[in-house]
């Protein structure tokens, strides 16, 4: 069987006999966004459904948006990258520190992207070469990154007292088009590119095939390691870009411990994404839906209950549990459906080796 014939159907949305069975699993989360928006708009009509609130939310959550898209790529090949939450903190610090040491802000961006790619390579080596579980490997890598961040900062804020940041760098974090924040537009552009790659290009089909069943993908001639390395490297570079943008939005000071606070919300958005649009598998549009649910939900709750900051981790935690549960059920149902459709003895390869 040639690569060009590969279509990952193991995790496709179900084709139920009724309208509700077809629509609810695919657009149920989208409906939740609409419901949440209506509730908060009615409760806080003067502050929530306003253009100013949209600009604040889109600008303040653009980095989270980018990170959620970055973590979506490893999840497409069946891996979870936990190092991004620590990486974004390191790259935010280095974006300022390197400029304070005289490096041009454009060179700093290149250095950060290269550093992010290096982190991705290390993660992939641990996962593929050393055969360490992705969860453990990337968590360990993240702790090393965290240690480097603390070594650079000494555990304190880094403040640009001499104003050595380039003015163009400052504008990079504040530019907009027709009052739409530029950082948000960058996130949207990344989402569009990822959607095209994963949904319409062969590389996307191969990534989903590896994520659905690595053994079957190898039997079909797909080099699993190539796509795991590629997804990890891309995730690392996207994390670097997020850290660079995060630094550009800060007013002359950065701190390394801000990154881990973004870990859970980004993972939550990605897991929510696997329960909508393409139920049972992560996808860029689903991740966008997940971001909107998180941002609208948290913003609305904080406006209704000002000062109740415990609502943010509570909402993220409960949403993540719900998303993982729904995603697991959806994935299991898709696999069971495919197993029933494949005749006995004809399992994508030889003697059932294709099935894990």
Image: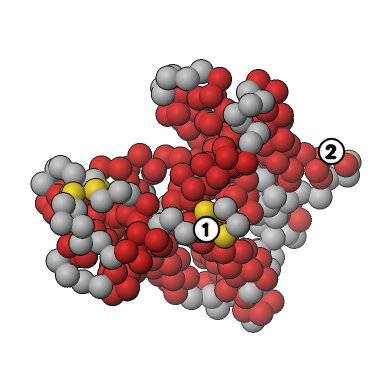
How far across and how far down the image is residue 203, in percent?
57, 73
Instruction: Tell which residue pokes out farthest to the right in this image.
Output: 18
How far across and how far down the image is residue 302, in percent?
50, 25
Residue 188 found in image quarter: bottom right
Q: Is residue 44 left or right of residue 158?
A: right
**What label does residue 20 carry, if any?**
2
Q: Residue at x 37, y 52 (%)?
A: 249
Residue 282 shows in this picture: no
Relative to 177, does residue 223 appear above or below in the rendering? below
How far across and how far down the image is residue 272, in percent?
58, 42
Residue 324 found in image quarter: top right
Q: Between residues 37 and 82, which one lies in front from this camera angle?
A: 37
Find disc 1 in the rendering and name its residue.
176
- N-term mark: 1 or 2: 2
Q: Between residues 165 and 22, which one lies in front from this camera angle?
A: 165
Q: Residue at x 29, y 69 (%)?
A: 105
Q: Residue at x 66, y 57 (%)?
A: 10
Q: Residue at x 73, y 45 (%)?
A: 26
Q: Between residues 276 and 191, which one lies in front from this camera angle?
A: 191
How far across and how far down the image is residue 125, in percent?
31, 67
Q: Secondary structure at mark 1?
A: strand
Q: Secondary structure at mark 2?
A: helix
Residues packed near mark 1 inside 10 Å, few (<14), some (14 to 19) or many (20 plus): some
């Amino acid at each position: 069987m040639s690569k060009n014939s590969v279509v990952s159907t193991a995790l496709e949305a179900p084709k139920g006999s009724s309208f509700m069975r077809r629509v609810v699993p695919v657009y149920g989360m989208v409906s939740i966004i609409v419901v949440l928006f209506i509730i908060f708009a009615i409760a806080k009509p003067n502050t929530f459904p306003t253009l100013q609130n949209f600009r604040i939310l889109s600008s303040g959550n653009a980095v989270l948006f980018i990170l959620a898209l970055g973590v979506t790529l490893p999840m497409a090949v069946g891996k979870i990258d936990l190092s991004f939450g620590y990486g974004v903190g390191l790259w935010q610090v280095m974006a300022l520190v390197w400029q304070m040491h005289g490096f041009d802000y454009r060179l700093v961006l290149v250095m950060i992207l290269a550093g992010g790619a290096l982190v991705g390579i290390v993660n992939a080596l641990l996962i593929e070469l050393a055969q360490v579980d992705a969860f453990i490997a990337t968590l360990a890598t993240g702790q090393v990154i965290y240690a480097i961040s603390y070594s650079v900062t000494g555990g304190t804020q880094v403040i640009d007292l001499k104003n050595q940041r380039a003015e163009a760098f400052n504008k990079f974090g504040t530019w907009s088009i027709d009052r739409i924040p530029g950082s948000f537009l960058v996130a949207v552009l990344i989402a569009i590119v990822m959607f095209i790659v994963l949904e319409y290009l062969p590389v996307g089909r191969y990534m989903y095939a590896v994520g659905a069943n690595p053994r079957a993908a190898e039997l079909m001639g797909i080099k699993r390691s190539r796509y795991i390395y590629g997804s990890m490297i891309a995730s690392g570079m996207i994390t670097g870009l997020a850290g660079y943008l995060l630094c550009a939005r800060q007013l002359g000071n950065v701190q390394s411990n801000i990154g881990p606070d973004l870990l859970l919300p980004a993972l939550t958005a990605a897991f929510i994404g696997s329960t909508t649009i393409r139920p049972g598998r992560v996808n860029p549009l689903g991740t966008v839906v997940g971001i909107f649910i998180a941002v609208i939900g948290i913003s609305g709750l904080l406006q209704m209950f000002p000062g109740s900051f415990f609502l943010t981790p509570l909402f993220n935690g409960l949403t993540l549990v719900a998303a993982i549960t729904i995603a697991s059920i959806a994935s299991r149902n898709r696999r069971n459906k495919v197993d029933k459709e494949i005749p006995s003895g004809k399992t994508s390869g030889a003697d059932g080796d294709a099935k894990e």
